[in-house]
Image: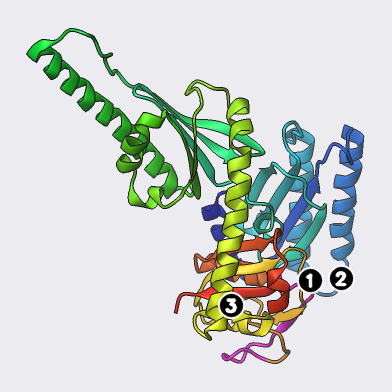
Amino acid sequence: MIVKQRLRELAGFRPEGHKVLSLFLNLDPSEFPTPRDRTVEFESLLDVVERELREDSLDHKQRVELKRDIDRVRSWYATEFDASGARGIAVFTASAIDLFDVHRLSRPVRSEVTIDDSPFIEPLTSLPGRDGYCVLLVNRQIARILAGGSDGLREVVSIVDDVHGWHDQGGWSQARYQRGIMKETKDHLKHAADELFQLSKRGLVQRLIIGTPDEMRGEVQSTLHSYLRERIAGWLEIDVRASPAAVKQEVGEIIAEDERRREHDWLERLKSEVGRNARGAAGLADTLEALNERRVEALLVQDGYRPEGYATAGADFLSTEPGASPTGEELVKRDDVLEPAMESALEQSAEVVVVRRFPDLESLGSIGAVLRF
């Protein structure tokens, strides 16, 4: 599971004078069903890298480093690679700075490899947002937290607190006893809410789904940190002891609807801001300018849009035209300027929204941004 914080770290990773090798391997069983099929695909990617080593664009030191990177990736594949449960693999490596980052992906990706001044993260940012969801299952004694999305969930927290049961005896002792139970329940819910908030600090809770008895919804919601209440995507009734597979099946429709609503809401906000000539940018040139000025709250991109453009080596200045940056650094042509644009958006903690369900963005140039100011 790729959390947003790690994507931001990768986006800002530009080791000066060194190259980063980024490799994406498609493990879709319908295309690569056998170990031999996967190995042939993997070796074809490394063949591409070895051919690029002969290009004049690399100096001697970079060629030596990339040869070490190839050896490291090959060794990993031979001794550590495991295709079970994954639909894709992303590997980022730069031996000169001791970078070797492997991510198992829950959805297929196109097999490709790049050598660049920074990790090639665009395939990760443009994956459907099936990660970043957390499911809190909670009753008066048990709490479980599962992370992932509709493609798979894993349990990350399990809590069983000592909360006594109610009884039917009356009188003052009964009232005191019930007040004690209410206190224990409140402590239990706070325990679960605290664990959830700690996970949110690590970037694991972009959206939240809660499974709890109907009569507890108010208690649970009021116990959550306000940051988490704003991220509730839906509620469900389910046995708190349900398996991750059963939970995954139940949350699928909630996630699909939440994704559709998220795209729609950002699109409507962008159209409103652009229409009022306010905090909105539409089209490639205006959007890149807003990214350069670090004013972007959300970057919206139509699925499949891959524009050409220009960028400085560190991708800290982007343009639709050749020339130089304001600091005088020469701009280099990029066949896909969307990659550094997404890096820039993540670096400034902006949302990245790949629009798949609506055609509205095409009329605005297939790319736009909602601005902070």
Q: Nearer the viewer, residue 214 or 131?
A: 214
Q: Is residue 208 left or right of residue 302?
A: left
Given this view, does label 3 or label 1 mark the residue nearer the observer? 3
Q: Is residue 54 magenta?
A: no
Under circle 1, the secondary element is: loop
Q: Is residue 336 magenta?
A: yes
**C-alpha distance separating marks 3 and 1:** 22 Å
**C-alpha distance separating marks 3 and 2:** 26 Å
Which disc, if any, is residue 58? Answer: 1
Which disc, if any, is residue 316? Answer: 3
Q: Nearer the viewer, residue 247 or 22?
A: 247
**Residue designated by label 2:** 55
Given this view, does label 3 or label 2 mark the residue nearer the observer? 3
Question: Label 1 amino acid?
Answer: Leu
Quadrant in the picture for residue 305: bottom right
Q: Percent position (x, y) of residue 200?
A: 43, 47
